[in-house]
Image: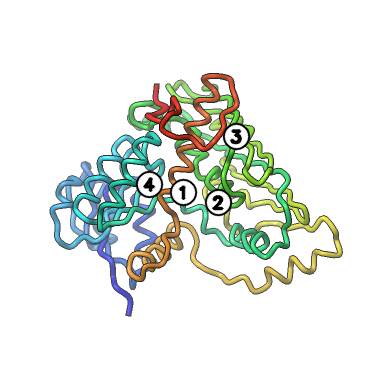
Amino acid sequence: MSTTLRVAIVGAGIGAEHLKAYLALPDLYRVVSIADLDRQRAAPLVAAAGADYDDSLQAVLAREDVDVVDICLPPQLHKEAVLGALACGRHVICEKPLTGSLAQCDEIMAAAAASTGQVMPVFQYRFGQGLGQLRRLIDTGLAGRPFVATVETHWNRDANYYAVPWRGRWDTELGGAIVGHAIHAHDLLVHTLGPIVAVQAQLATRVNQIDVEDCAAFIIGMGNGALVTSSVTLGSARDQSRLRFCFENLSAQSSLDPYNPGTSPWTFQARDPFEQSRIDSALADYPAHQEGFARQFELAHAALTEGTPLPVTLADARASLELITAAYSSHATGERVRLPLNADHPGYAGWVP
């Protein structure tokens, strides 16, 4: 019989999507608290979960019936919230971006190592069926060597979206489209092809009257030699995300789902038509499973109760922050930035001007 973990969701914005996932896993989780400064905004979540309402993180940490603190706050509040929960020995789930700098990420990693609690960043796009199929083709060797890839995060965000006071500002959102929007697609890139070794980027604010970028273009070099381009805009006619990979033996293209490009259907086309049957056979018995938040939280439960590896780690979050740091550095200097980045890099303490 599985152990039911008791969860407090702190932040009723994206926290509403997290709650749906917990409710889909009733044998694994019970949401006992919804915390938000706005009681009215929290009310639907409280009712759906049958949970208590709390008005602060401090109130949540004072409770004795919370195993997991799920942080769904604006980005500038993440670090202190994570550190506070770890200091109380609680497990932590935290929305992206984990923090606003590599230095803060390393501080969290040190605190987690000293705590009985564990930290799992949220990268729910990883758990789509289609992406899992691609990982199988890579792991079995059928894909072969990667050559190139393209990543597209083309979404539509206008003045109404930026009417939320903390959006579009360096001090609260900690960056623009490469921090709040493309971070997921870039995580899928690293999750699929491994570490990044070089980044050149140009950023621009072309769509909205905001302080941060809403367009970007990247040239990315991977450790395995693959070359990648990524384009990001918040001025698309419709929301669409796409990843396309060209390997030695096949080409793979994602779905166009903007918020879950890892989901099916993906297309996998053999370079040699006579090899298509091998690819199709390798995927024929790929098991169906939960996707998105629900799948990540399902795997996290096993990690927190049985000691299996966390499905997303602090090292994964650090890799995403490293790419962001390199992109802002490249844009500022006009130079190609080599990774990994350590404490001696000028952007280590943060990219916010």
**Quarter residue 25 falls in:** bottom left
Which residue bears the numbered disc 2?
191
The residue closer to the viewer here, 78 or 205, is 78
How would you rate the neighbour count of disc 3 (Cα within 10 Å): few for under 14, some for 14-19, many for 20 or more? some
The amino acid type, in three-letter code, at marker 4 is: Glu
- Identify the residue at image location x=48%, y=41%: 320
The picture places residue 179, in percent across and down from the top left corner, at 46, 35
Q: Camera-side residue: 28 or 85?
A: 85
Q: Please, what secondary structure does the residue beneath circle 1 have?
A: helix
- The residue that label 3 is drawn on is 198
Q: Position of residue 140 (x, y in %)?
A: 67, 65
Between disc 3 and disc 2, the foreground one is: 3
Q: Which residue is mark 4?
A: 95
> Disc 3 on helix, strand or loop?
strand
Q: Earlier in the sequence, mark 3 or mark 4?
A: 4
Marks 3 and 4 sit apart, C-alpha to C-alpha, by: 26 Å
Amino acid of disc 1:
Asp
For marks 1 and 3, give the one nearer the viewer: 3
- Density class for disc 2 (Cα within 10 Å; few <14, some 14-19, many ≥20) is some
First-in-chain label (3 vs 2)? 2
3D distance between C-alphas at marks 1 and 3: 17 Å
